[in-house]
Image (cartoon, helix red, strand yellow):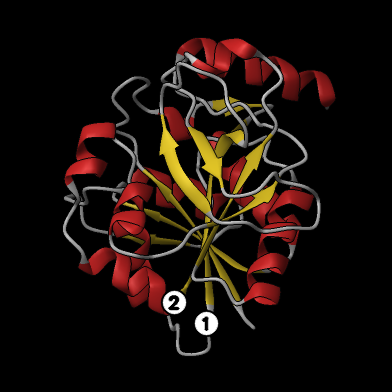
Amino acid sequence: MKTLVIIPSRLSATRLPGKPLLKINGISMISHVFKKAEKANIGEVIVATEDQEIIDDVIKNGGQAILTKKQHKTGTDRIYEALQKFDNTSIDLIMNLQGDEPLMNIDDIRNLNKQMIKNKSQLGTLASNIKDSNIYENKNIVKVITKEKLDNLNFPEALNFERKILKQSENIYHHLGIYCYQKESLKNFVSFNQSSNELKNRLEQLRALDNGIKINVALAKSSPIGVDTNEDFVAIKKIMEYKS
């Protein structure tokens, strides 16, 4: 099966404008992410963006990018437009990576791709163990509740996704913003209107569950920090500059 990796990215992030082009070790964050995706070596990698500056930056750093229209409601709608503009006849799976997670683990990306192929799932994602109890209350960190306890081998279904969980119960994990779609599932997903559940919780994956698209979850080795605020950026920059 053939996988295409698409990374949606835009400059107008509300909490940290210009985020994709912030530099770490002299390279923009979006370019760090696509280089990481290329290292995973599961398929061709393209960035989908509404901003010419991002296109120029990605190309300058040796990547591929597709210009999309501005008025997309979600990143998934953006990657679908990019997929349609790409020669996708031989593509079976689309991996959607977040442009603000340069510390994503390559093994986790590969494992999600492998589980999708092995289980012929409609849609898959990743989650990691919660080690800090404050995460349950933090509405910026999305949690997923799964049918079964996650281990290194299984790929159980997600029952629900929530931003805030008040009582800790079984099978709750830290959801990571990475998705892998069967091409047909992605096409179906974007054909549905945004569900009230999705809009209320600001979680686009609820549109899939509300319309009968099953989401399977694989266990990730690590929880990369996503960059939503300037503090997140400073923290990630420190880690990455120290590593290099």
Q: Residue at x 47, y 33 (%)?
A: 21
> In which quadrant will I find the N terminus?
bottom right
Q: Is residue 81 visible?
A: no
Foreground residue among 139 and 14 = 139
158 relative to 13 in the view: left or right: right
Q: Residue furthest bottom?
A: 89
In percent of the image, x 64 and y 21: which residue is there?
Answer: 236
Using the image, determine if residue 168 lies above or below residue 58: above
Q: Secondary structure at mark 2?
A: helix
Under circle 1, the secondary element is loop
Percent from the top left, x then y, of residue 207? 29, 53
**Is 146 situated above or below 25?**
below
| Image point (26%, 43%), residue name | 198
Check if mark 2's residue and mark 1's residue have beta carbons within 8 Å. yes
Mark 1 closeness class: few <14, some 14–19, many ≥20 residues within 10 Å: some
Residue type for callout 1:
Ile
Quadrant of the frame with the C terminus: top right
Q: Amino acid at mark 2?
A: Lys
Label 2 packing within 10 angstroms: few (<14), some (14-19), many (20+)? many
The answer to whether residue 219 of the structure is visible from this angle is yes
Residue 183's disc number:
2
Q: Is residue 94 above or below residue 148?
A: below
Q: Nearer the viewer, residue 103 or 127?
A: 127
Q: Can you give x and y, in whole percent of width and height, for residue 27 in the image? A: 62, 34
Q: Earlier in the sequence, mark 2 or mark 1?
A: 1
Judged by depth in the image, the label closer to the viewer, 2 or 1, is: 2
Q: Where does label 1 land, which residue?
A: 91
Quadrant of the rendered image containing residue 31 = top right
